[in-house]
Amino acid sequence: MTGLMSGKRGLIMGVANDHSIAWGIAKAVAEQGAELAFTYQSEALGKRVKPLAGELGSSLVMPCDVEDVGTVASVFETLGSEWGSLDFIVHAIGFTDRSQLKGRYVDVTTRENFTRTMVISAYSFTEVAQQSMALLNPGASLLTLTYGGSTRVMPNYNVMGVTKAALEASVRYMAADFGAQGIRVNALSAGPVRTLAGAGVSDARLMYNFQQKNSPLARAVNLDDIGGAGLYLLSDLSGGVTGEIHYVDSGYNIMSMPRLDELRR
Ligand code: NAD
């Protein structure tokens, strides 16, 4: 199955280190021949991202803090002059004040952090789509990362759950908008993974263990699982799929209660 992504060029946003979900997807598509560009949020993270990008043969590595509209625009200006067009984008960006990922949503959520979380973790995907529009080839695929706390209550996920609901809605609206150009927009809803962002949720380890034990596959998902699903959604294999929220969570989202064998323990 080599060469599924041969001739395709894509942008990976959201690598912080080699545990990042974006890194898992980057490796999977690079193995299949994709040419990649990367963004990094800050100079400190850039020191980690540049060598990782180098491992996949990429030297196009650009700063981009989505709170700064200018840096988003300059990424696509650079891609326009370096490549002229683009076949896919991975948006794996999320942030909130971690002090609000603890306790009751209704008690801890402030207007300021609600707004900031929405801008960074949801609106930025729309903005990236807007800024990249002129470069996207027919058949291009846009992919973002979400979590099941968008539709069901996960303890402590709080404002991130509300924000992921907005992100998922934006996937559907943009899928409808871009459909006429043959451009697809989808989200991967990953089960818990131990990353920098994932560790910000209070009691993350308890949730990780609970979901692992109570999912049909009875195991955690890993970067290879998510990378494989990312490859599918970014490649022509999923040519008829758009507006989808595709779960990669060992099946946890289909369960209505803990597994009986776990309850009987
Ligand atoms: P991570 O910490 O490795 O990645 C988060 C990325 O967001 C980092 O690269 C960080 O630099 C970037 N980011 C944050 N604020 C930014 C800003 N202002 N501008 C630009 N970049 C910014 O963690 P991850 O778990 O790989 O997270 C990637 C995505 O996957 C997030 O959207 C997260 O919500 C989602 N997700 C994570 C899990 C999990 O359990 N880890 C599960 C489902 C979905």
Image: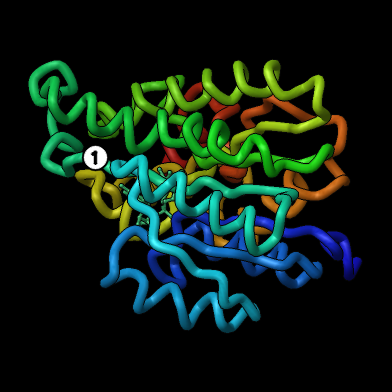
Residue in the image at 52% along x and 41% along y = 145
Q: Is residue 212 left or right of residue 216?
A: left
Which residue carries the number 1 mark?
96
Element on which disc 1 rests: loop
Give percent across and percent down for residue 212: 48, 49
Q: Is residue 45 left or right of residue 168?
A: left
Residue in the image at 53% along x and 44% along y = 190
Give percent across and percent down for residue 23: 53, 65
Observer-nearest residue: 121 or 130?
Answer: 130
- Residue type marked 1: Thr
Name which quarter of the figure residue 246 lies in. top right
Name which quarter of the figure residue 26 lies in. bottom right
Q: Is residue 235 visible?
A: yes
Extreme residue in the front direction: 81
Observer-nearest residue: 251 or 112?
Answer: 112
Q: Quadrant of the N terminus?
A: bottom right
Residue 255 against residue 45 in the figure, above or below: above
Observer-nearest residue: 133 or 201?
Answer: 133
Residue in the image at 46% along x and 45% along y = 73
Q: Is ligand 1 less than 8 Å from the beta carbon at label 1?
A: no
